[in-house]
Image (cartoon, rainbow, N blue to C red):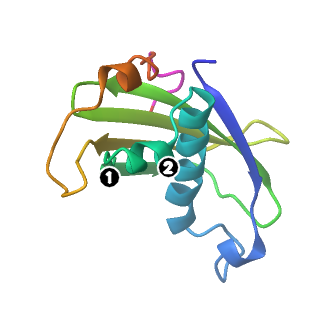
Amino acid sequence: MDITEYELRVRYAETDQMGVAHHSHYLVWCEAARTDHMRRRGVSYRDLELQGLKLPVVDARVRFRQASRFDDLIRVRCWVRDVASRRVSFGYAIERCDDGVLLATAQTSLVAVDSNYVLTTIPPEIRAKLVPIPDPVRL
């Protein structure tokens, strides 16, 4: 369970005039995969925020490799790349389910802030659930 998989189907509204999934949606798909990844490890964004801890994204990168189109069933694989006292980084591989073609890779980094948006630390019990692994694909 070091790498989780989140599947979704590209909606028509997510495509551009060329029939290709618009680049802006890839980060939304990564967010869904990241939230699911954390939930499966017993870490709920909602619970963290109720405790006064927020994890805003401070860095995001996407490398596009192939086009994704309307009605493609895609899989977003997600894993923890690195975790430190104040920062956690995730990696993503976005693939078409039918043929396994790698459509894009991505990475995001999040930092811990309190309810006043002051930099703080990620509690040790949360860090313990976010175990980093080597990247399974080249980002």
In the visual, does 80 lie left or right of 84?
A: right
For the question of whether residue 23 can be seen, the reply is no
Task: Identify the main secondary structure in magenta.
Answer: loop
Residue 138 to residue 29: above or below: above
Q: Element type at marker 1? A: loop
Q: Which residue is mark 1?
A: 56
Q: Nearer the viewer, residue 54 or 81?
A: 54
Classify mark 1: residues with Cα within 10 Å, few (<14), some (14-19) or many (20+).
few
- What amino acid type should be assigned to the residue bearing mark 1? Pro
Q: Which mark is residue 46?
A: 2
Q: Residue 16: image x %, image y %?
A: 64, 78
Q: Residue at x 49, y 49 (%)?
A: 46
For the question of whether residue 4 can be seen, the reply is yes
Q: Residue 106: image x %, image y %?
A: 46, 43
Q: Magenta segment range? A: 134-138
Q: Nearer the viewer, residue 88 or 118?
A: 118
Q: Residue 33: image x %, image y %?
A: 59, 44
Q: Residue at x 59, y 54 (%)?
A: 29
Asked whether residue 127 is drawn in magenta, I would say: no
- What amino acid type should be assigned to the residue bearing mark 2? Arg
Of the numbered discs 1 and 2, the one sitting upstream in the chain is: 2
Give the quarter of the figure containing the N terminus: top right
Classify mark 2: residues with Cα within 10 Å, few (<14), some (14-19) or many (20+).
few
Q: Residue at x 63, y 30 (%)?
A: 40
Q: Element type at marker 2? A: helix
